[in-house]
């Protein structure tokens, strides 16, 4: 369960880093025609502008999912730490009770 948490945290962090970079690149191409002209001159692919908008939208969604996942995992991590500390506390109380009774 802890391994899954680590993987989800890595996913969250990667989406928090990669998505803004992709959004920035898409906005750069959309709002600076020189970059777009050079791109169209060198790679005359049909639908390049559409792909830029799709990239921006997908990146925005990825960023949103990453933020939501990070918030969820942060709350879950706090709850899990509290669970572990309570479990350790109960274990120590049981061990102390067993020691006091002489068993």
Image (cartoon, rainbow, N blue to C red):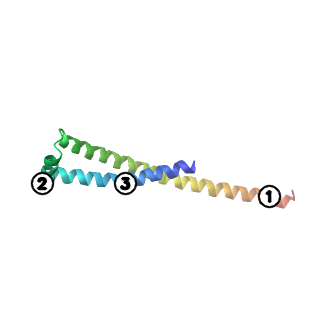
Mark in front: 2 vs 3 = 2
**Badge 1 is on which residue?**
97
**Residue drawn at (34%, 49%) of the image:** 63
Q: Is residue 24 left or right of residue 12?
A: left
Q: Position of residue 92 (x, y in %)?
A: 73, 59
Question: Which circle's residue, 2 or 1, is located before the other in the chain?
Answer: 2
Alpha-carbon neighbours of circle 2 within 10 Å: few (<14), some, or many (≥20)? few
For the image, the number of numbered tags is 3
Quadrant holding the C terminus: bottom right
Alpha-carbon neighbours of circle 3 within 10 Å: few (<14), some, or many (≥20)? some
**Badge 2 is on which residue?**
34
Q: Position of residue 95 (x, y in %)?
A: 77, 58
Question: Which circle's residue, 3 or 1, is located before the other in the chain?
Answer: 3
Q: Is residue 8 left or right of residue 66?
A: right
Secondary structure at numbered mark 1: helix
**Residue drawn at (15%, 46%) of the image:** 40
Query: Farthest residue toward the right?
Result: 102
Q: CA distance from mark 2 to mark 3?
A: 28 Å
Q: Position of residue 102 (x, y in %)?
A: 87, 59
**Badge 3 is on which residue?**
16
Q: CA distance from mark 3 to mark 1?
A: 48 Å
């Amino acid at each position: 369960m802890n391994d899954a948490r680590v993987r989800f945290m890595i996913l969250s962090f990667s989406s928090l880093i990669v998505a803004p970079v992709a959004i920035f690149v898409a906005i750069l191409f959309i709002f600076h025609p020189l970059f777009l002209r050079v791109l169209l001159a060198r790679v005359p692919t049909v639908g390049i502008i559409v792909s830029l908008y799709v990239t921006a939208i997908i990146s925005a969604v990825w960023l949103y999912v990453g933020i939501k996942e990070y918030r969820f995992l942060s709350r879950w991590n706090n709850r899990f730490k509290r669970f572990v500390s309570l479990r350790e506390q109960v274990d120590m109380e049981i061990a102390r009770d067993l020691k006091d009774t002489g068993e």
